[in-house]
Amino acid sequence: MLSKIFKAYDIRAIHPDPLSEEAAWKVGYATGQYLIRAGGGDSNGKVLVSRDMRPSSPALSARLIDGLRCSGTDVVDLGMCDTSFIYFAINHLDAVGGIQVTASHNPIDYNGFKISGRQARPIGQATGLADIQRIAENLPANIGPGALEPTGRLESMDLWDDYRRHVLKFFTPPRRPIKVFVDGSNGMAGVLVPKVFSDLENVRIIPLNFEIGQGFAHEPNPLVAENMIPTQEGVRDNSADVGACFDGDADRCMFTDETGEILGCDHLTAMMAHHFALQEKGSSIVYDLRSSKAVEQTIRELGGKPIRSRVGHVFMKAKLKEADAIFGGELSGHFYFRDSFYTDSGAVTFALILSLIGASDEPLSRMIQPYRKYPQSGEMNFRNEDKEGVFRQIRERFGNVAQIDELDGVTVDAWSSKTRIFEPDGTGGFWFNVRASNTEPLLRLNAEAVDQQTLKTVLENITPILGEHVQGH
């Protein structure tokens, strides 16, 4: 049964079956053993536990803590908070690791555990989660809930004041009054925003869906366009300067400009990269390889060092730390900050965007416009069982006429190519990436070109070999 709840990067499933309280205990016991070993046998190392607002979170958290303590691990209960809070707390307290009880943007009947090690490094299948699963699945029959006395100590701690001070290091009071419409998605933003962003100079926040614990007014996933509609309407109805919609555990938020238009996360990456490149000359900035060419170009033009990364927070965080990069941005809405312990933070992103808007005399739509240079396909999904066969066709077709790399799937870059690639049509510069889903027989395509006609030509030539187009996936 435990095999059904362990995923590539976290533990997540429907509660109570297969994610039961007994499973939570076993995950706690196994994680305690793993984290103490990974910490060099530091028997004094504390593990932090926090939870989101889901109805099942208190019970799962209690069982998880009991399992940790029965493994001999000392636990600090942080209570209910956003996921980025525990990343901060692990570093702030120099803990051996931490576990957030959350299912992020999944429906209300889901729950799960995001596990981090020292310095809030993510623990996925390749970085420890497989070991935790093995320990949990191989526990003797006499080790389980109620069979052992907890020997680890338990304390509760309120770190909200410290967290607020940390987040607001990234905030500069606006020069003019700004109005911000925020959809909390009935998630942890309903706690985060009032605790961290109340009473800020020149900032008025108009809240929507801040009520928590009873379900979601809409799916708490701002990457789905229809979930952004309340934010778009709220911005227009209230003549707000910006709109923000957080996901369930509030480690991500998507933004709209003052007209209600949704902003691409790669364009936001470019805008924030501009800020950081000016702040620290020659700094490295990481971006996910699906991002617009405008990101790389912006970083280079300002003397920074652009670094491409594989998709996913595990890879982004590792690359950020490896390069000691000041900032990183991902198309999924995760943004990473060196001065926030190389972790992603919806709270820090929100603080920074408010600061940038407040420092400019222009509306957000004009601020973002310089980075909206090129037409894009958006992510398109295709059902295909023969992923490697498709990759081989792409390599054979473009190997002699464009740059190809396989950092994540296959990327074809003909941005600067002088070769006439698609006959009989001449084309301008373009690039595209095709990568495989980790969990489904799907290929994901992202493409960009210097003009709309080139993009159309690229898609007409590429999509037929990718399989059946899956709408709205």
Image (cartoon, rainbow, N blue to C red):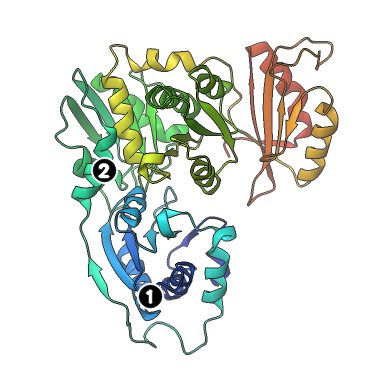
Q: Which residue is mark 2?
A: 166
Amino acid type shown at disc 1: Ser
Image quadrant containing the N terminus: bottom right
Dividing the picture into quadrants, the one containing residue 308 is: top right
Mark 2 touches mark 1? (CB < 8 Å) = no
Q: Which mark is residue 389?
A: none
In this picture, is 372 found above or below 29? Answer: above
Relative horizontal placement of residue 71, taking residue 413 as reference (left or right): left
> Is disc 1 placed on a helix, strand or loop?
loop
Image quadrant containing the C terminus: top right
* Furthest residue in direction front, as rendered: 282
121 and 7: which is toward the camera: 121
Q: Residue at x 22, y 23 (%)?
A: 179
465 and 312: which is toward the camera: 312
Query: Where is residue 106 drawn, in percent x and y?
Result: 44, 50
Query: Where is residue 289 drawn, in percent x and y?
Result: 60, 33
Instruction: Let me know if residue 60 appears in the view.
Output: yes
Query: Mark 2 and mark 1: span between their CA atoms?
Result: 29 Å
Query: Where is residue 271 drawn, in percent x and y?
Result: 43, 22
> Is disc 2 placed on a helix, strand or loop?
helix
Q: Which residue is mark 1?
A: 43
Instruction: Let me know if residue 109 appears in the view.
Output: no
Mark 1 Cα shell of 10 Å, populated few (<14), some (14-19), many (≥20):
some
Dividing the picture into quadrants, the one containing residue 417 is: top right
Question: Which of pointers 2 and 1 indicates the residue nearer the eye?
Answer: 1
Mark 2 Cα shell of 10 Å, populated few (<14), some (14-19), many (≥20):
some
In this picture, is 308 found above or below 65? Answer: above
Q: Earlier in the sequence, mark 2 or mark 1?
A: 1
Amino acid type shown at disc 2: His
Relative horizontal placement of residue 247, taking residue 406 as reference (left or right): left
250 and 33: which is toward the camera: 33
Q: Residue at x 56, y 69 (%)?
A: 131
